[in-house]
Amino acid sequence: MKPGTRAWFCGALGGLAAGILVMHRFSASPAAAKAEPAGNPHELYQLAGNQIAAFRRDDFPSAYNYAARGIREKFPLPQFEEMVRQTYPHLTHSGRLNFGEAQFAATIRASAMIYVSNGQQSLPMIYAFVKENGQWKIEGVQMLQGGAKIFPGGEPRT
């Protein structure tokens, strides 16, 4: 195995393992005992995609509207913008999004694996969602940096 291939493989494996642990921890919550048999992952993907599109446009007021009440209470809009720019700068300059597994726990919690790409690097992230007043909102995001994949010459198109 080539050294670059080994590094990519190890990084992808690490990201996958971390993702599985996070998803398992999320689904092992008491709410998961009442797991909803089927949910609509496209609704979650669209929500995350809409927020990321707002970040790309520097439209933080719109992006803020997709955040759950707990995030909005913890971070007023100026602090939310600063937190995103400092902690998740790749979201403001992202290119393509790829969507992975989504899990629903009860009728009020869900999570989804979303890969954010800038054309050279694809970062796996776990998005956590909560249903508020009948609508999904983004409750949190966790980067899985161990799973970052570097594509010399650009990201392959699938």
Image (spheres, grey):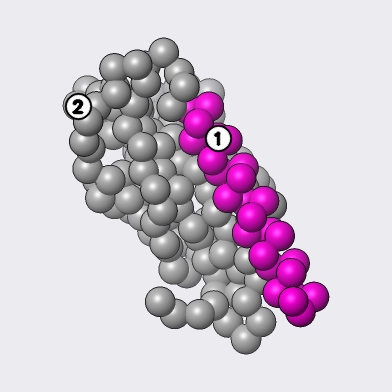
Question: Range of the magenta residues?
Answer: 1-26
**Quadrant, the N terminus:** bottom right
Which residue is at a point 42% across and 62% down the rendered structure image?
Answer: 98
Q: Judge left or right: residue 43 versus residue 146.
A: left
For the residues labelled 2 and 1, the Cα–Cα distance comes to: 25 Å
> Per the image, is 28 magenta?
no
**Quadrant, the C terminus:** bottom left
Badge nearest the viewer, 2 or 1: 1
Find residue 8 and report its image quarter.
bottom right
Look at label 2 and name its amino acid.
Answer: Gly
Q: Residues within 10 Å of mark 1 (few under 14, many from 20)?
A: some
| Residue 124 percent location from the top left of the image | 55, 54
Residue wearing tag 1: 22
Outermost residue on the top side: it is 30
Q: Earlier in the sequence, mark 2 or mark 1?
A: 1
Q: Could you say which is closer to the camera, residue 113 or residue 119? A: 113
Q: Quick check: can you spot residue 85?
A: no
Q: Could you say which is closer to the camera, residue 60 or residue 157? A: 157
Give the overall secondary structure of the magenta segment. helix
Outermost residue on the front side: it is 1
Q: Residues within 10 Å of mark 2 (few under 14, many from 20)?
A: few
| Residue 38 percent location from the top left of the image | 21, 36
Q: Secondary structure at mark 2?
A: loop
Query: Is 119 placed above or below 114 here?
Result: below
Residue wearing tag 2: 134
> Per the image, is 23 magenta?
yes
| Residue 135 percent location from the top left of the image | 23, 32
